[in-house]
Image: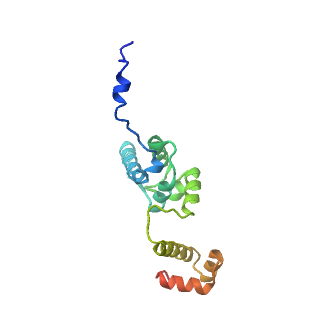
Amino acid sequence: NGRFREDLYYRLNVIPITIPPLRERVEDIAPLIMHFLNQFNSKYNTEKIVAEEAMEHLLQYDWPGNVREVANMVERIAALTPGNQIEVGNLPAKIMEQSSNKMATVTVRGLIPLKEAVEAVESQLFTAAYRELKNTYKVAEILGVNQSTVVRKLQKYCAK
């Protein structure tokens, strides 16, 4: 209609507002998932919840479609999940594939002394491997260390 003031863009552009993508705002993902899940629970009269392990995978996903993708994915998962608990097996393959790749790598989110970082990674690796394999010889084989090292590290990190 020709009513748009020509100078309006320049007046609005005085303070640029940038919203970073979700992959840079990981702390916003869980609250968004819970918001949309609550919304769909109300809409469909259900009481679905997200299992902790499933939430970990959802937090590792990059969400290239940002908030709209979160909303669509949560609705899809909520609609297709039988029962009230959304488990890892209910997640789409693309989320599982990307999150598994990320979860298998070490990510540095802050700065801590190297010794503390190494101990944290060792603790996670040894306890996770032992929890899964339940055998120190198998853990040693997978991690590429001696079995005696596995026993010593498990004792150190109180996993056994």
Q: What residue lies at 60% left-to-right and 87% top-to-bottom?
A: 148
* Residue 160 on image: x %, y %: 50, 83
Q: Is residue 36 left or right of residue 90?
A: left
Q: What residue lies at 44% left-to-right and 60% top-to-bottom?
A: 51
Q: Is residue 6 left or right of residue 91?
A: left
* Residue 136 on image: x %, y %: 59, 82
Rendered image quadrant of residue 98: bottom right
Q: What residue lies at 34% left-to-right and 32% top-to-bottom?
A: 14
Residue 70 against residue 60 in the figure, above or below = above
* Residue 95 on image: x %, y %: 55, 52
Q: How is the image coloured?
A: rainbow
Q: Nearer the viewer, residue 86 or 111?
A: 111
Q: What residue lies at 48% left-to-right and 58% top-to-bottom?
A: 54
In the rendered image, the residue lying farthest to the top is 1
Residue 87 against residue 5 in the figure, above or below = below
* Residue 19 on image: x %, y %: 41, 42
Q: Nearer the viewer, residue 35 or 25?
A: 25
Q: Quadrant of the N terminus?
A: top left
Residue 129 against residue 39 in the figure, above or below = below
Residue 32 against residue 88 in the figure, above or below = above
Total numbered badges shown on the rendered structure:
0
